[in-house]
Image: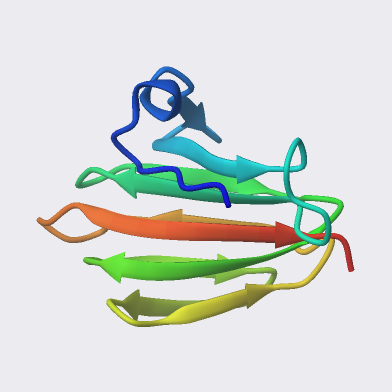
Amino acid sequence: MIVRNINDQEVVAETYLAHGGGLARMLLDSRVLKGILFLAYGFLDTGKTIESHQDPYEEIYFILSGEGLMTVDEDEKQVKHGDAIWIPQGAAHSLTNNTENKCHILVIAAYA
């Protein structure tokens, strides 16, 4: 069993800037996972954006708290706490926190 907390020293030490606007912490990745590429926790401060980008894998963004404007290719929708957003492999996607509260997300990625 592997248990990692978002506040564990080794997780905090790997905090990184995600696509220009979000801060993220890699909880689990392909060093230990077999069928999933990674599980990351991230957050966006007010006015920050995870800039539009494309990945060679599919992802799910799960909104833990807060809200934001999610764009996947040509689709744009306000997303909120409890929403799961599927992002197909190769789709351009971004998330902007257009509210006054922090937006917390989980990102799960796997090869299609």
Looking at the image, which is closer to me, 52 or 79?
79
Q: Is residue 82 above or below residue 92?
A: below
In the image: residue 43, left or right of residue 85 = left
In the image: residue 112, left or right of residue 28 = right
**Percent x, y of residue 26:** 53, 38
Q: Residue furthest top?
A: 13
**Which residue is drawn at the image coordinates 37% and 25% (left, top)?**
12
**Percent x, y of residue 25:** 45, 36
**Which residue is drawn at the image coordinates 82% and 54% (left, top)?**
34
In the image: residue 102, left or right of residue 2 = left
**Percent x, y of residue 48:** 32, 42
In the image: residue 34, left or right of residue 63 = right
Number of callouts: 0
Looking at the image, which is closer to me, 5 or 14?
5
Looking at the image, which is closer to me, 3 or 26?
3
Q: Is residue 46 above or below residue 26?
A: below
